[in-house]
Image (cartoon, rainbow, N blue to C red):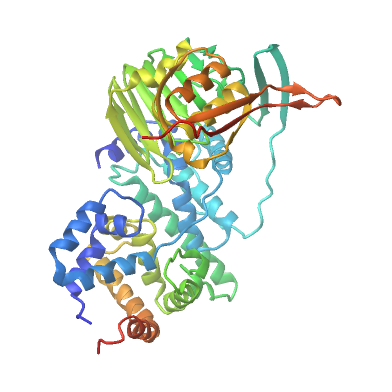
Amino acid sequence: MEYENLQWQKIKSGDISVLEIFYKTYFDDFYFYGLKIIPIPDLVKDAIQDVVIAIWEKRATLGNIQNLKAYFFTVLRRTLIQTIECDRKTTSQHHFDNDLFSFSAEDFIIDEENAAEIKQKLKYCLAELSPRQREVIILRFYHTMEFSEMAEVLQMNVQSVRNLLFRAIGKIRDHIEATTTDTIKVHQEVLNPKKS
Amino acid sequence: MAPLNKVLFEELLADESFVAWASGKSDQHLFKWMQWKNEHPADAYTFDEARRMVRLLRMEGTPVPPKEVDYLWQKTERILRNKTRLNVWPHIIKRISAVAAVLILPLIMATVWLLISNYKISEELTASENSDRVINTIFNTQGAPVFIDLPDGSKVWLNANSKLTYPEVFEDQSREVTLVGEGYFKIEKGRIPFLVKNSGPDVKVYGTEFNVNAFNYSEHTKVSLVSGKVSLLVDGNENVLKPGYIASFNKSNGMLNITKGGIDQEICWREGKHILKDVTLRELLVKMKSKYNVNFELKDQQLGDYKYNITLRDESLEQILDLLSLTAPIKTHYTKPSLTKDGTYLKGKVKIERDKSRSIR
């Protein structure tokens, strides 16, 4: 997008106010994304600060960034994951892997009849996905990223991202269907008693 | 049940406009998708499943309070400015330990005094490690507009129940003010962009005359451009406004609408005139409540829906009540404000009820 390129050009030339606007506009998104990787608020806030500083200081050498937001996500991701890995080497905690991109039932807004039940099911079935699959779900549906942006953040090619996303959705669909089909069937029979 | 058309399912989920509509984030594409569904009856099941999937995966994050974001930015900016001056290369990634951060609040001294009985000025001194910035806040609690001269020669007229915050000296990178309520701006042209922050999108100014309406209680913020050029910063994008156009921002769905004309209505408050077209009685009562400092009691809720086209100047409350009962079958009864025996002040009160002797068309 043209404006975003202009935005980066201004930051490159030393315009802090543009960086400030960028920071304040997308802070919530970066924070929410970071929290899914490591659910420790202060750590994520510090990481965001580090990324801003790193980008500002290296602005001259960074070349042309087409999509600053996606780039920021990429660097933030790398920063946070490296933090976990450093931690892992010195301690023997590897439970982080399973917790990466973890969702609680409360994260979801669902307005169907059995809302609480579906939220729980969704939570469990998301737990069965790989961290990468969970990540792609959140990038697509919460951050509404396009495939090209996700490819940049995940450092994969667009086709692989597509496969990843749709495999994840397929798994979710199967899981939710399997556990709620019976309820739906019962409802349908009640509503249409004459139909076979 | 009909089998799922996998290809279509994936195409829909890969489509930005479908996801935007299905997640309920915007109504922009509603018509498009309803039309699509009508034109493809055989794919109704797949369509519904795709929509269901999107709705299933809707998540809500709790936003970080803006004050905290501002605070975090200030911390970051201080470091950035230091690094710019000293040209120090940073550590790229450092080990961060999961220790709760201790927030050190800057010392804030607030001194409040009344210059003129009509408006209050409060001064905040924020002392930080590197700089001292004096910030002025002007709160207009009276009815008439208050005139403010900004440090760069720009002029602002502040409407009633409105607040303008600005630094005593503008920074060399940006001229920034914060508005709550309504203000009319006449900004000096300058190399440094002027920014009006408010509860809606930031208004970026290039030297010009315009009006910003951004009350906290309202669902919309409106920017009306008289002359010159401004742009509204929505999601990092600049939406340019041309003279004679009004930009209306809906706070609940984040949509920006730009329409032509109607500027007079938006700026007449400066002359003490209020041109109100197609307002309901209910909306009028809200405005009058703050202007005349009275309470209103609407005996019949349906009366609140009556619409008015009305131009108000400096009429007294009683004159307006008379005007209102001319065109709608209402009776008004006004109790003047009074002081009770033990010294408490009772606000004026207006009871509005249906006038049964007059028939409704």
* The C terminus of chain B lies in quadrant: top left
Can residue B141 be seen in this snapshot?
Answer: yes
Residue A6 coordinates in the image, percent (x, y): 29, 35
Query: Who is closer to the viewer here, B127 or B35?
Result: B35
Residue A41 coordinates in the image, percent (x, y): 57, 56
Can residue B85 be seen in this snapshot?
Answer: no
Residue at image location 37% in from the left, 13% down from the top: B189
Residue at image location 26% in from the left, 56% down from the top: B16
Question: Outermost residue, bottom direction?
Answer: A196
* The N terminus of chain B lies in quadrant: bottom left
Q: Quadrant of residue A140?
A: bottom left
Residue B267 coordinates in the image, percent (x, y): 41, 18
Query: Who is closer to the viewer here, B137 or A38?
Result: B137
Residue B327 coordinates in the image, percent (x, y): 42, 25
In the rendered structure, the answer to whether residue B146 lies left or right of residue A162 reads: right
Q: Quadrant of residue A152?
A: bottom left
Residue at image location 60% in from the left, 72% down from the top: A91
Count of numbered labels shown in the rendering: 0
In the rendered structure, the answer to whether residue A115 lies left or right of residue B232 reads: right
Question: Outermost residue, front direction?
Answer: B357
Is B356 above or below relative to B46?
A: above
Residue at image location 30% in from the left, 69% down from the top: A165
Q: Quadrant of residue B49?
A: bottom left
Is B111 above or below relative to A59?
A: above
